[in-house]
Amino acid sequence: MLRRLSLRDFVIVSELDIELGAGFTALTGETGAGKSILIDALQLTLGSRGDAGVVREGAARADLTAEFDVSPALATQLRPWLEEAGFDTGELSDASGATKGGPLLLRRVVDAQGKSRAWVNGSSATLTQLRELGEHLVDIHGQHAWQSLTRADSVRALVDGQAGVDVAALQAAWAARRDAARRLDEARAKQADLERERERLQWQIGELAKLAPQPDEWATLNAEHTRLSHGQSILDAARGALDAIAEAELNAEGLTARAIDVLDEAAGYEPRLGNALEVLREAQAQLQDAAHSLHAVLGHTDLDPDRLAELDARLSAWMGLARRYRRQAHELPELLQGWQAELAELDAATDLAALERAAEQAHAAWLKVAQAASKQRKQAAPKLAQAVSEAMQELGMAGGRFEVALTPLDEPQAWGLEAIDFLVAGHAGSTPRPLGKVASGGELSRLALAIAVTTSRQAEGDDGSHVATLIFDEIDSGVGGAVADTVGRLMQRLGGGPRGRQVLAVTHLAQVAACAHHHLLVSKSLQAGQTTSDIRTVQGEARVQEVARMLGGAIGDTSLAHAQAMLDAAQGQPGTPQKARKSA
């Protein structure tokens, strides 16, 4: 649940720290006092859009922090996500590393230029990550919640949420079905073009396949051609060098041997000749190696005109195809592989039978998911209808009936096999009709409240992992009298008991405020030429005064007595004391 909310330079709040506890908390105040300012701040902390307008006039930035106390069950659910995103989860673990409940800190800063930054447990975060966390932490019902009851997508989302439909799986299966159908349609429409392209590729591949160019073959052919075309020059050079080294009448090897013989005897008398003698012996060995290599060249160099002609023809074929396709000759093997890959893709694209099978399989996969969603909806619809109908009786719509209509579609849609509509009969004996056509503004508000309360109750999981904080922002607009008493007691029930939620309600109804376990009063004042907002806890006489003010008219003994009686009659659960501190 939301444990603490801290605001700095937010709209008309200079500095505010408010601690919140379990149970039902009412936020009240004069019209224009800024009763929804806490809701706005919390929504900003949970990733809603924010601009420079949220920064208090004259301040450099708005700084908002929300601290949540996460239950062990919810911590178990959130911890893998937090770890994967790189956020600190130390406070959610005990010494052994096991998951436990603990604090979760969200912070948002918006500067005077409208630039925004966010953190989760001290680590930088994106607004998307804040919003994803917010879905697990807070459920906000706004004063215009009834408007969504007339929108098909909102109605469907509400029912699917109650039914536990895996919307992501349904959307993924629909996308796969749509893509498979698109590929089949495109192949059918482009069949003639694809066939012409296929024939062109086959012809080009046939030409290159006759040459059968191999990787690195171009370099090998050129090296061999160079060697054969210069064969005579190679033989002449090798013979001339061999004569000079070893085979001419006067050759280097013979002269070196003579020098060695001359120095060999004298070196015994003059040690300094030893170095020269050693160098000459090494030179003699190298000359002998060179002569051996030259003999090998002479023995293996073949003036093969037939092979040279064959190489000329092969190289000419390479160069001809390279010019035709405007490529470098060495690129031909890669070009052939690319065309073969393209042809394989075209073969797959023109294989209508395979594409038809793929489309059928994708449709079958989607149909399986859609049918499972339909089954879940059919199971959840009557339960939701009954629960909302019961809530309607409490909210002054005696005899009224609520239904969730599932109408099969002629053509399947991304969301499934049926349209989902809310039908309502405002009183006994009337036939349920589409909600937007038969309900008045006041009835719509009460229906929205009935649905909000019902779905909040049904969302409670046995493991305690449900959203723990519910916020109602003037959702009781348009109701009064005995119905207002019922609204207050419904919220009181939601926030009471061992498995109660934390319920925050911005309200203008004294009957609702009287049922709250805690009461926060929002007021506005002018200080140093600037309008500032203050939020403080009211108890005892101060709370009686506020409830009396909400009843309307002048505050006197009668209204104070009435307010006290309302507070005395309210059967709330005592909760954790709350503290609010404000500094100008």
Image: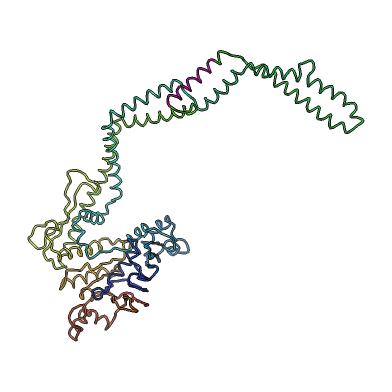
The residue drawn where x is 76% and y is 16% is 247
- Magenta portion: prevailing SS class: helix
User: What percent of the width, then of the height, locates residue 506?
Assistant: 25, 70
* Numbered range of the magenta stretch: 309-325
Q: Is residue 315 magenta?
A: yes
The residue lying furthest to the bottom in this view is 557
Q: Is residue 420 magenta?
A: no
Among the 4 quarters of the image, the one containing residue 196? top left
Image quadrant in which the C terminus is located: bottom left
Residue 559 visible to the viewer: yes
From the viewer's side, name the closer residue of 305 and 487.
305
Total marks drawn? 0
Q: In the visual, does 190 lie left or right of 250? A: left
User: What percent of the width, then of the height, locates residue 152?
Assistant: 20, 53
From the viewer's side, name the closer residue of 342 and 319.
319
User: What percent of the width, then of the height, locates residue 385?
Assistant: 18, 58
From the viewer's side, name the closer residue of 258 and 496.
258
Residue 4 visible to the viewer: no
Among the 4 quarters of the image, the one containing residue 23? bottom left
Q: Is residue 265 above or below residue 85?
A: above
The residue drawn where x is 37% and y is 26% is 201
User: What percent of the width, then of the height, locates residue 89?
Assistant: 43, 61
The residue lying furthest to the left in this view is 429
Q: Is residue 43 above or below residue 417?
A: below
Q: In the visual, does 246 lie left or right of 205? A: right
